[in-house]
Image (cartoon, rainbow, N blue to C red):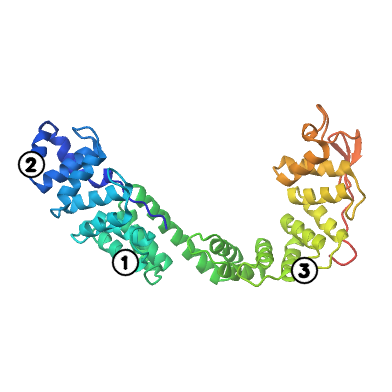
């Protein structure tokens, strides 16, 4: 939850207007302030804070806020709290800031209530306490403070310090959004996100695979809901069970990493295979890695290279790099630097850092793009690439025959 402490420039607008309107008689404010007039002391503090009719001076501003705050002036108490919070004219001290925010908030000053809520939410100067944060947010929100309305909505959305209640969250976000400005814009975004999440949930519960997948992604990334691998995994499986290829891949990745489920390499390989059989190039590469490492499946360089080749044929830079390395080192394939370099160049051109490093190590930095004026490979006018395609220069003259799966029924 993003918490921004409002600067006093926004908070003292009334004081600024008074000072600007009476700049010619500012000395009268000073005379009254020196005689103990709390309102004059507050206005003089504002004048020094912003350089209104006097040279800007944080220390003088804090001094006059303190004089006024000692008389119980709520605005000055808030101003002094800000001074301590930001270390303007006084040493930064969150506990002291919160003391003065509390004095002001007890008098019903909404901006102090908001800042005190923020302090409890963040645990700055006071012990972190979401319930106390929400108490003060509510006090300020009931006075129409947009920041407090937004923050209270966020608390209901996350269930921090209040029972999770999306209807209440939506109510307070809409209140904040109606006020416009930056805070209102953020709140409008929350309202739109809630509406989107509600629609996705409805569609997912009806069995819409795309909605199930998108909802899973939201849980995986914490978009609109608290991040939860377990909930993400639940919806990935729902979509994967319907053959939704992206969900199959992400479900496999969850089993690979143990996100939301017990780590299970065999289950990961199962779902990678499901996605790979639908032509997902990332899944083809991942299944190749599983075969290369013997992760969840028996180790087989032939099967690894079969899937790397499938992935590379779709221009997947990871598949190209893996296949290139197997050509370079003769892993399950005849050693062939020319084919390795070709594959590395293709992957490197997509920004793959491993391919860039492999290529540099094999040919040197100056030759990563081939000799000047050369086609994509400098080794022969006519050559066969890693996929079995025959090229003359940059023109394909004979496509490769259809790749066949290894004889294990892949």
Residue 175: name its quadrant.
bottom left
Residue 207: give x, y in percent of width and height. Answer: 58, 70
Of marks 2 and 1, the one in the foreground: 2
Residue at (32, 49) in percent of width and height: 92
Q: Please name whichever residue, 16 or 42, is drawn nearer the observer in this view of the structure.
A: 42
Q: Is residue 277 visible?
A: yes
The span from disc 2 to disc 3 (Cα, nearest Å) is 82 Å
The secondary structure type at the circle numbered 3 is loop
Look at discs 1 and 3 and give the one toward the viewer. 1
Q: CA distance from mark 2 to mark 1?
A: 38 Å
Q: Nearer the viewer, residue 212 or 228?
A: 228
The quarter holding residue 407 reads: bottom right
Q: Badge 3 is on which residue?
A: 296
Quadrant showing the C terminus: bottom right
Q: Residues within 10 Å of mark 3 (few under 14, many from 20)?
A: some
Residue carrying label 2: 32
How busy is the neighbourhood of tag 1: few (under 14 within 10 Å), some, or many (20 plus)? some
Left or right: residue 268 compared with residue 401 = left
- Quadrant position of the N terminus in the picture: bottom left
For residue 73, side relative to residue 298 (left or right):
left
The correct choice, above or below, for 344 with respect to 286 in the image is above
Q: Which mark is residue 100?
A: none
Task: Please report whichever mark, 1 or 3, sits nearer to the chain's N-terminal start.
Answer: 1
Task: Answer yes or no: is residue 316 visible.
Answer: no
- Distance Cα–Cα, label 1 vs label 3: 50 Å
Give the crowd class for mark 2: few <14, some 14-19, many >=20 residues within 10 Å.
some
Check residue 132 in the rendering and tell me which mark sits there, or answer none.
1
């Amino acid at each position: 939850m993003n918490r921004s402490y409002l600067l006093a420039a926004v908070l003292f607008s009334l004081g600024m207007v008074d000072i600007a309107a009476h700049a010619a008689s500012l000395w009268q404010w000073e005379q009254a302030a020196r005689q103990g007039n709390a309102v004059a002391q507050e206005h003089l503090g504002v004048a020094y804070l912003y350089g209104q009719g006097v040279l800007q001076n944080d220390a003088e501003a804090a001094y006059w806020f303190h004089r006024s705050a000692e008389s119980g002036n709520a605005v000055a108490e808030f101003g002094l709290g800000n001074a301590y919070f930001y270390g303007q004219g006084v040493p930064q001290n969150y506990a002291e800031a919160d003391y003065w925010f509390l004095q002001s908030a007890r008098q019903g000053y909404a901006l102090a209530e908001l800042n005190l809520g923020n302090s409890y939410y963040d645990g700055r100067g006071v012990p972190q306490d979401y319930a106390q944060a929400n108490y003060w947010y509510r006090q300020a929100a009931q006075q129409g403070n947009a920041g407090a309305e937004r923050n209270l909505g966020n608390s209901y959305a996350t269930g921090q310090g209040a029972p999770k209640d999306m209807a209440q969250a939506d109510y307070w976000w809409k209140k904040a959004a109606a006020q416009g400005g930056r805070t209102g814009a953020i709140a409008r975004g929350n309202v739109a996100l809630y509406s989107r999440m509600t629609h996705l949930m409805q569609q997912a519960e009806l069995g819409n695979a795309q909605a199930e997948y998108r909802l899973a992604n939201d849980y995986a990334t914490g978009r609109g809901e608290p991040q939860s691998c377990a909930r993400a995994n639940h919806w990935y499986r729902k979509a994967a069970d319907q053959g939704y290829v992206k969900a199959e891949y992400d479900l496999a990745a969850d089993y690979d990493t143990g996100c939301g489920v017990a780590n299970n390499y065999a289950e990961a390989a199962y779902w990678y295979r499901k996605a790979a059989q639908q032509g997902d190039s990332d899944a083809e590469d991942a299944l190749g890695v599983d075969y290369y490492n013997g992760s969840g499946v028996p180790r087989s360089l032939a099967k690894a290279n079969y899937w790397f080749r499938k992935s590379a044929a779709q221009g997947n830079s990871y598949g190209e790099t893996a296949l290139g390395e197997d050509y370079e080192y003769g892993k399950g394939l005849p050693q062939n630097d020319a084919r390795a370099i070709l594959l590395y160049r293709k992957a490197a051109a997509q920004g793959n850092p491993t391919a860039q490093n492999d290529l540099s190590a094999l040919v040197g930095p100056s030759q990563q793009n081939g000799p000047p004026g050369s086609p994509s490979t400098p080794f022969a006018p006519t050559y066969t690439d890693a996929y079995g395609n025959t090229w003359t220069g940059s023109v394909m003259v004979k496509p490769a025959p259809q790749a066949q799966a290894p004889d294990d029924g892949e």
